[in-house]
């Protein structure tokens, strides 16, 4: 009841890691969702990610700018249809820099150009195990935006996949940024609450738009 009656406050979850509730307003969420639906179409569209051990990730993914596959980046969908990765739009980079500055302030924000988007779609029983975003050469903050169903986002330490960790409820429109001493912290999604997306959004499931700075040479 209280969560519905009173605004949720932003929270510093760890040094360099900040949760900002309701950062995207309903119009902003709908605009980002429309873009995600365009990006998900083939070629280089939404795919199932297969791990080197033969398993599959339950969350499906599409990439922009650079194509991520376990555990490297390429300019083509090397583990899918082998077409060029979709371009990373300038407006999405502007959104990433604005989000990082809003969450972390001038001392934690970055002037670097965001050039990677990993967009994960969680449907049904999809989850994400504890992992680190460690395949980039840049230490610029990671920007994460949530659309659709509410999830439990588990944020841990840089040393271990296990405790201690903090569970944060991420709802549609929420922003989570982690950089500085938390840039390589383990994190994951152990649970998604199906059917909790805003009724006016028009999405069943959860989309997570994660923006990163590669640090790779532009002409590579």
Image (spheres, rainbow, N blue to C red):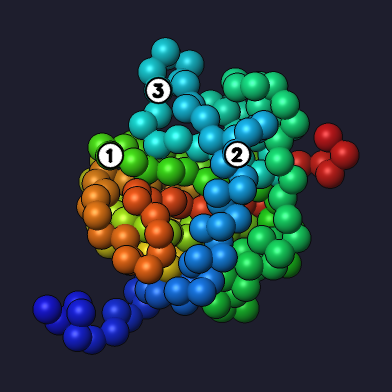
Which residue is pictured at 32% across the width and 66% down the height? Answer: 199
Percent of width and height locating residue 105: 56, 78
Taking depth in this image into account, of 74 and 146 the one nearest to the observer is 146
Q: Earlier in the sequence, mark 1 or mark 3?
A: 3
Q: Do residues under tags 3 and 2 come within 8 Å of each other at their CB atoms?
A: no
Q: Nearer the viewer, residue 83 or 23?
A: 83
Q: Which residue is mark 2?
A: 41
Where is residue 175 drawn, in percent x and y? 45, 66
Residue beneath disc 1: 124
Q: Where does the image place residue 161, in percent across and percent down from the top left?
A: 32, 39
Identify the residue shown where x is 83% and y is 35%.
220
Q: Residue at x 69, y 56 (%)?
A: 114
Q: Which residue is mark 3?
A: 56
Q: Judging from the image, what secondary structure is the residue with disc 2 in?
A: loop
Q: CA distance from mark 3 to mark 2?
A: 20 Å
* Residue 152 in sight from this viewpoint: no
């Amino acid at each position: 009841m209280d969560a519905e009656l009173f605004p949720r406050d932003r929270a510093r979850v760890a040094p360099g890691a900040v949760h900002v509730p309701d950062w995207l307003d309903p119009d902003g969420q709908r605009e980002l969702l429309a873009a995600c639906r365009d990006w998900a179409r083939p070629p280089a569209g939404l795919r199932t990610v297969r791990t080197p051990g033969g398993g599959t990730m339950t969350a499906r993914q599409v990439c922009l700018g650079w194509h991520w596959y376990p555990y490297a980046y390429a300019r083509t969908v090397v583990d899918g249809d082998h077409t060029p990765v979709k371009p990373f739009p300038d407006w999405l980079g502007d959104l990433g820099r604005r989000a990082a500055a809003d969450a972390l302030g001038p001392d934690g924000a970055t002037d670097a150009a965001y050039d990677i988007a990993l967009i994960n779609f969680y449907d049904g029983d999809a989850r994400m195990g504890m992992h680190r975003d460690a395949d980039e050469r840049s230490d610029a903050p990671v920007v994460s935006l949530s659309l659709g169903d509410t999830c439990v986002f588990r944020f841990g330490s840089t040393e271990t996949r296990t405790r201690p960790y903090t569970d944060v409820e991420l709802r549609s429109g929420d922003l989570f940024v982690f950089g500085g001493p938390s840039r390589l912290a383990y994190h994951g999604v152990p649970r998604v609450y199906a059917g909790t997306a805003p009724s006016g959004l028009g999405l069943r499931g959860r989309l997570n738009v994660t923006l990163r700075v590669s640090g790779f040479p532009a002409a590579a």
